[in-house]
Image: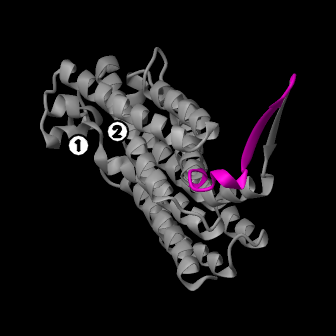
């Protein structure tokens, strides 16, 4: 397997869905909590990228193994295994190496932080595997958007913040005789949740847009995704309003005084988003307008990152 086929197998271009939340979380830790640890950041980045690539490779491998319809735009041109005639042994070995690297780095991160990182890491790892693997992978069900959005949009941001602030007692677990107590800094966690909302929305919509475009192929291949279950019209309605709901983030963070009023400039994202949404609704085809969902996520992520950086630089 050469570099080109490897990058296609792991769909390296889709890693923006994990890299942007990671960058945003690290910057928010610096801005809001005034804390930053370069070593923790680098370890988490390696673990995150390895697990993300492994999950995508498993996804492509399972699509290849379970496909009923073996011709058509989505399968022949976009599955790296078919496109580059990859051997199963190569694929399995690649997945195994990526998983080992990810788990090793995750274990190191736990050792230099605390049990919260281990717990969330194990949970995320499990979801990542079962998202693409097993008798009924999550991505083949109506719950793919929820799992991908929440685990990549919220948990990546939460962990990329938490690794810098283990001494801030965001979550504390203690034992005393027969009692166990769990204490959380609910305000900080709510702030993190609001901050992550646009990323949850954007990642969910990438998955939803992909499933809307692939409805016919998914039905033939027995992938009962959300659009297949509820229909294209309702799925497009959810796609549009998911973007509008993320506006709660801009207002909520300012109301809670977690950020300055400059953060309301986040509403500027709706200028390009409105056209991207309109074009996708008019013609939701993979080869024409699926990229609009990716563009919307990238533009939103870049704007939020810029707004946080402005507040860091000018100490707003």
Location of the C terminus by quadrant is: bottom right
47 relative position to 277: left or right: left
Residue at image mark 1: 7
Where are the magenta residues, as a range? Answer: 161-178
Q: Residue 286: where, in percent of width, then height?
A: 34, 47
* 174 in relation to 26, above or below: above
Marker count (numbered):
2
Residue most extreme to the front:
177
Q: Which residue is drawn at 29% across and 39% down?
A: 10
* 257 in relation to 198, above or below: below
Q: Earlier in the sequence, mark 2 or mark 1?
A: 1
Q: Which residue is drawn at 45% across and 17% down?
A: 134
Q: Residue at x 54, y 36 (%)?
A: 121
Q: Which of 124 and 301 is in front in this view?
A: 124
Tell whether label 1 touches label 2 (CB within 8 Å).
Answer: no
* Structural distance between the alpha carbons of marks 2 and 1: 9 Å
Q: Residue at x 49, y 63 (%)?
A: 301
137 relative position to 290: left or right: right
Of the numbered discs in the image, which one, if any, rests on residue 53?
A: 2
Q: Nearer the viewer, residue 98 or 261?
A: 98
Q: Can residue 17 be seen in this view?
A: no
Q: Residue 255: where, in percent of width, then height?
A: 78, 71
**Residue 116 quadrant:** top right
How busy is the neighbourhood of tag 1: few (under 14 within 10 Å), some, or many (20 plus)? some
How busy is the neighbourhood of tag 2: few (under 14 within 10 Å), some, or many (20 plus)? many
Q: Which of 302 and 281 is in front in this view?
A: 302
């Amino acid at each position: 397997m050469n570099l080109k086929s490897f990058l296609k197998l792991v769909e390296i271009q889709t890693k923006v869905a994990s890299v942007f939340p990671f960058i945003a979380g690290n910057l928010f830790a610096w801005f809001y909590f005034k804390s930053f640890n370069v070593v923790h950041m680098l370890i988490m980045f390696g673990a995150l990228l390895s697990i993300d690539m492994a999950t995508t490779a498993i996804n492509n491998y399972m699509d290849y193994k379970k496909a009923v319809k073996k011709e058509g735009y989505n399968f022949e041109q976009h599955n790296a295994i078919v496109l580059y005639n990859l051997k199963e042994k190569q694929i399995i070995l690649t997945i195994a190496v990526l998983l080992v690297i990810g788990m090793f780095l995750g274990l190191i991160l736990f050792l230099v932080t605390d049990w919260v990182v281990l717990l969330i890491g194990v949970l995320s790892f499990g979801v990542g595997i079962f998202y693409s693997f097993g008798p009924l992978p999550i991505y083949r069900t109506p719950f793919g958007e929820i799992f991908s959005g929440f685990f990549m949009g919220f948990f990546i941001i939460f962990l990329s913040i938490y690794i810098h602030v283990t001494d801030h007692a965001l979550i504390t677990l203690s034992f005393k005789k027969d009692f166990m107590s769990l204490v959380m800094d609910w305000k900080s966690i709510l702030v993190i949740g609001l901050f992550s909302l646009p990323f949850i929305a954007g990642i969910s919509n990438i998955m939803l847009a992909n499933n809307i475009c692939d409805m016919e192929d998914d039905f033939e291949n027995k992938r009962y995704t959300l659009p297949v279950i509820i229909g294209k019209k309702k799925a497009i309605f959810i796609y549009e309003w998911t973007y509008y709901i993320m506006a709660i983030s801009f207002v909520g963070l300012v109301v809670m005084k977690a950020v300055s009023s400059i953060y309301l400039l986040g509403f500027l994202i709706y200028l390009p988003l409105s056209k991207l949404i309109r074009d996708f609704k008019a013609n939701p085809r993979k080869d024409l307008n699926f990229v609009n969902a990716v563009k919307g996520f990238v533009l939103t992520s870049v704007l939020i990152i810029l707004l946080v950086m402005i507040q860091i630089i000018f100490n707003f």
